[in-house]
Structures are given as structure tokens and as C-alpha cells.
């Protein structure tokens, strides 16, 4: 190896020993946040950052899709609850219209117990209260005691119907029968009070949903 070759080898060694060129972010500003790295380091950091962004974006897209689906399901449930509330409120309103005539009939029965024919009519009258909407009660909005009040009223109507069937053929002049009619009057008053509570809850819910909630007149049509 001659002198020229030795010089070239030394030059290459010196060049190789030099640190890699660095590229700085905001290099024209001498601030603490100025970052300088080689091309390889910048490349590695960019890959890491874009990987994190890709993962975050995938998570965000999944979250938004889930949120929108949840909102659509919630809206469908609210629409269904609206229809059920309107239907049940209409039925409850019709029942409340019979409050005074029904209680007046029972007050008279306390003085003069009903005949077997009148009992048959009254049992049929009570059974007409057993509306099909009972299956829909579970779909009503929770938190206002609507379902509990309706179930309480329906249970009283059913029990009174069963007990009234037992009075047929009984001694209409007996004091026990008069006490039975008094108890029936008290039970029916409780049932109508439960209907009033359910009607108030339905009105509150429908009002919050923007529906008209004009009260029903309890007087018979």
C-alpha cells in the first residue's frame, strides 16, 4: 500500500467515524422543545406515532359506531314506549270515567245488597276492566311507578270479580254480606286511586316527550 492509498483509507475512516447527520424539528428556534435526530431515528418515531394513531382511530371508529347504534336502539325503545303510553293512558282514562258510577253502585249495595242478576252484571262490568294492555305494562318507562300502580289496580279488579262470584246465592239480608260490599267499596276505591297514580305518571312521561296530556273527565260520558 503506497502513501496515496493509505491517505484515502484514513480519509474514509475519518468520514465513517463522523456522527450521522441530524435533522432538527424547529431548528431555527433555540428552545427546549427543539428535537434533533438522524433519519433512521425520525423514521422509527414516525412509524411508532402513526401506529398509535392507527390504533386510536380504529378504536374511535368502533366507539362511534357503537354509540350511534345504541342511540338508534334507544330511540326505537322511546318510540315504542310512546305508543304504549298513549294506548295505556287512553284505556286508563276510560276506566277513570267509570269511577263515580262504580263507587256509587257499591255505596248503594252497602245499603241494599245486589241481587244475583245485578251481581252478574257487575262482575261483567269489572271484567271489562281487564284490558289487554296488561302485557304491555312492562314496556312502559320505569321510575314513575306506572307499572306498579296498574298491576295493583288490575289485581284488585280480578280479586273483586272472584269474590263477587261467591256472593251469588248468599243471604242478601245478612250483615256479613253488607260488610262484604263495604269491603268491596274500599278495595275498588283503592284500585281507582292506583289508576289515578298511574294516569299521573303517564301524563308526566307524555308531557316530557312533548305530547298533549289533557286530563280525562272522571264523570261518565
Image (spheres, helix red, strand yellow):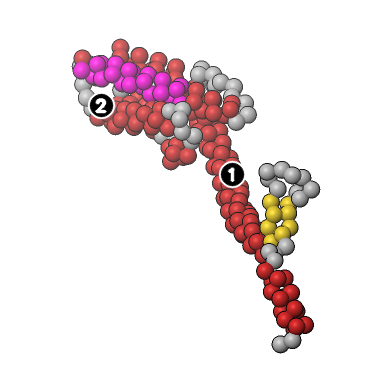
**How far across and how far down the image is residue 163, in percent?**
27, 28
Does the rendering let one see residue 145? yes
Q: Which residue does the image show at 54% across and 21% down from the upper left?
A: 216
- Farthest residue to the bottom: give it: 1
- Please say whether residue 69 is one of the residues in the magenta stretch: no
Q: Which residue does the image show at 55% across and 33% down from the upper left?
A: 86
Q: Residues within 10 Å of mark 1 (few under 14, many from 20)?
A: few
The reply to whether dot 2 and dot 1 touch (C-beta < 8 Å) is no
Q: Which residue is mark 2?
A: 167
Q: Please state which of residues 91 and 4 is positioned toward the viewer in this rendering.
A: 4
Does the rendering let one see residue 181? no
Tag 1, which secondary structure?
A: helix
Q: Is residue 37 left or right of residue 98?
A: right
Check the image and report above or below for 66 versus 6: above
Q: Which residues are magenta?
A: 176-198
Quadrant in which the N terminus is drawn: bottom right
Which comes before the other along the chain, label 2 or label 1?
Answer: 1
Quadrant in which the C terminus is drawn: top right
Quadrant in which residue 33 is drawn: top right
Q: Please state which of residues 180 and 119 is positioned toward the viewer in this rendering.
A: 180
Total labels: the figure holds: 2
- Dominant SS type (magenta): helix
Q: Residues within 10 Å of mark 2 (few under 14, many from 20)?
A: some
Q: Which residue does the image show at 63% across and 29% down from the upper left?
A: 210
Q: Which residue is mark 1?
A: 71
Amino acid at each position: 500500500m503506497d502513501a496515496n492509498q493509505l491517505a484515502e483509507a484514513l480519509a474514509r475512516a475519518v468520514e465513517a467515524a463522523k456522527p450521522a447527520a441530524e435533522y432538527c424539528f424547529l431548528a431555527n428556534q433555540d428552545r427546549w422543545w427543539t428535537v434533533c435526530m438522524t433519519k433512521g431515528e425520525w423514521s422509527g418515531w414516525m412509524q411508532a406515532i402513526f401506529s398509535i394513531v392507527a390504533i386510536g382511530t380504529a378504536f374511535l371508529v368502533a366507539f362511534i359506531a357503537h354509540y350511534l347504534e345504541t342511540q338508534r336502539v334507544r330511540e326505537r325503545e322511546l318510540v315504542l314506549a310512546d305508543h304504549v303510553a298513549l294506548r295505556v293512558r287512553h284505556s286508563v282514562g276510560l276506566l277513570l270515567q267509570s269511577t263515580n258510577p262504580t263507587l256509587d253502585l257499591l255505596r248503594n249495595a252497602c245499603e241494599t245488597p245486589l241481587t244475583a242478576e245485578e251481581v252478574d252484571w257487575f262482575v261483567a262490568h269489572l271484567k271489562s276492566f281487564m284490558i289487554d294492555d296488561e302485557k304491555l305494562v312492562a314496556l312502559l318507562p320505569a321510575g314513575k311507578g306506572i307499572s306498579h300502580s296498574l298491576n295493583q289496580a288490575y289485581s284488585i279488579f280480578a280479586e273483586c270479580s272472584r269474590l263477587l262470584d261467591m256472593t251469588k246465592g248468599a243471604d242478601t239480608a245478612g250483615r256479613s254480606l253488607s260488610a262484604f260490599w263495604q269491603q268491596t267499596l274500599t278495595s275498588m276505591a283503592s284500585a281507582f286511586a292506583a289508576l289515578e297514580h298511574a294516569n299521573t305518571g303517564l301524563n308526566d312521561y307524555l308531557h316530557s316527550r312533548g305530547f298533549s296530556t289533557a286530563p280525562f273527565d272522571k264523570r261518565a260520558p
